[in-house]
């Protein structure tokens, strides 16, 4: 397992260099890479896909959802620029893998999931693995988690047709949000949204991605 984990980390480093012209990050923060090393992906992968746990690609987790590509997990985590005191919201818990990585670089992680079975299984898994600074919630993440706002960072692991206003509102001044934007099965872009100290927002398109769709309250 150690050799496979080391190989995966080297692949992530290579991908970072390859996409640096798009993302502005030719290497990731040491704290992020340490988190990627510490969080063992096979703990979050369905048994039938364990053979592929250390591949740098997404995998099915049931209910039409996926566990994200490790490089994308590392990239989105790095771009949030989190500190040891940060509070971060994840929309789309899935298997809990991204939340586990976030928990190693932030003080508090709040994660929401609209599929009850995934929310319950991820919550149980994270507790059993000792990730005690993560709070999970079963709800539609399109409206965020107002009671825990504002957040230093927000990460959305499903593609929206537009950035949900509630999430922008729940982002602190000086905060950063990573969200895929685009239609299902069509071209999507990973967007970095920043909010300045006056509350004005700025967006930057980074690179093309492929995510499952973010479901609105009306669609849920």
Image (cartoon, helix red, strand yellow):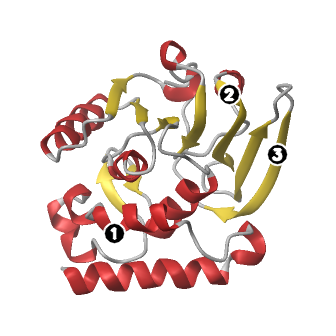
Considering only order in the chain, which callout, 3 or 1, is on the residue closer to the N terminus? Answer: 1
Q: Position of residue 211 (x, y in %)?
A: 55, 54
Residue drawn at 76 percent across, 41 percent down? 194
Q: Position of residue 128 (x, y in %)?
A: 13, 42
Relative side of 172 to 8, left or right: right
Any mark on residue 94, and which?
none
In three-dimensional space, the C-alpha distance between marks 1 and 2, rounded to whole angstroms, equals: 29 Å
Residue drawn at 42 percent across, 35 percent down? 109
Q: Position of residue 9 (x, y in %)?
A: 40, 78
Tell me the residue that label 3 is attached to. 203
Q: Are marks 1 and 3 in contact (CB under 8 Å)?
A: no
Q: Nearer the viewer, mark 2 or mark 3?
A: 2
Considering only order in the chain, which callout, 2 or 1, is on the residue closer to the N terminus? Answer: 1
Q: Crowdedness of circle 2 by 10 Å Cα count: few (<14), some, many (20+)?
A: many
Q: Crowdedness of circle 3 by 10 Å Cα count: few (<14), some, many (20+)?
A: few
Q: Nearer the viewer, mark 1 or mark 3?
A: 1
Any mark on residue 37, and which?
1
Residue at disc 3, secondary structure: strand
The residue most toward the top is 147
Residue drawn at 52 percent across, 37 percent down? 86
Q: Quadrant of residue 37?
A: bottom left
Q: Is residue 14 above or below residue 136?
A: below
Residue at disc 2, secondary structure: strand
Q: Position of residue 103 (x, y in %)?
A: 38, 45
Relative side of 89 to 21, left or right: left
Relative side of 175 to 212, left or right: right
Tell me the residue that label 2 is attached to. 172
């Amino acid at each position: 397992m150690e050799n496979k984990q080391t190989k995966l980390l080297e692949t992530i480093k290579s991908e970072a260099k390859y996409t640096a012209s798009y993302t502005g990050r030719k290497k990731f923060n040491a704290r992020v890479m340490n988190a990627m090393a510490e969080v063992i992906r096979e703990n979050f992968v369905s048994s039938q896909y364990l053979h592929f746990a250390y591949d740098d690609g997404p995998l099915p987790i049931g209910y039409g959802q996926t566990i994200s590509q490790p490089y994308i997990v590392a990239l989105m985590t790095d771009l949030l620029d989190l500190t040891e005191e940060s509070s971060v919201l994840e929309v789309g818990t899935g298997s809990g893998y991204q939340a586990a990585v976030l928990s190693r670089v932030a003080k508090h992680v709040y994660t929401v999931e609209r599929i009850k079975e995934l929310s319950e299984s991820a919550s149980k898994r994270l507790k059993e693995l000792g990730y005690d600074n993560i709070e999970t919630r079963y709800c539609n993440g399109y409206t965020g988690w107002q009671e825990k706002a504002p957040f230093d960072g927000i990460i959305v692991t499903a593609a929206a047709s537009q950035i949900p206003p509630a999430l922008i509102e729940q982002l602190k001044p000086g905060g950063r949000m990573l969200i895929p934007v685009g239609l299902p099965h069509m071209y999507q872009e990973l967007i970095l949204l920043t909010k300045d100290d006056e509350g004005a927002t700025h967006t930057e398109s980074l690179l093309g991605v492929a995510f499952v769709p973010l479901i609105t309250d009306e669609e849920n």
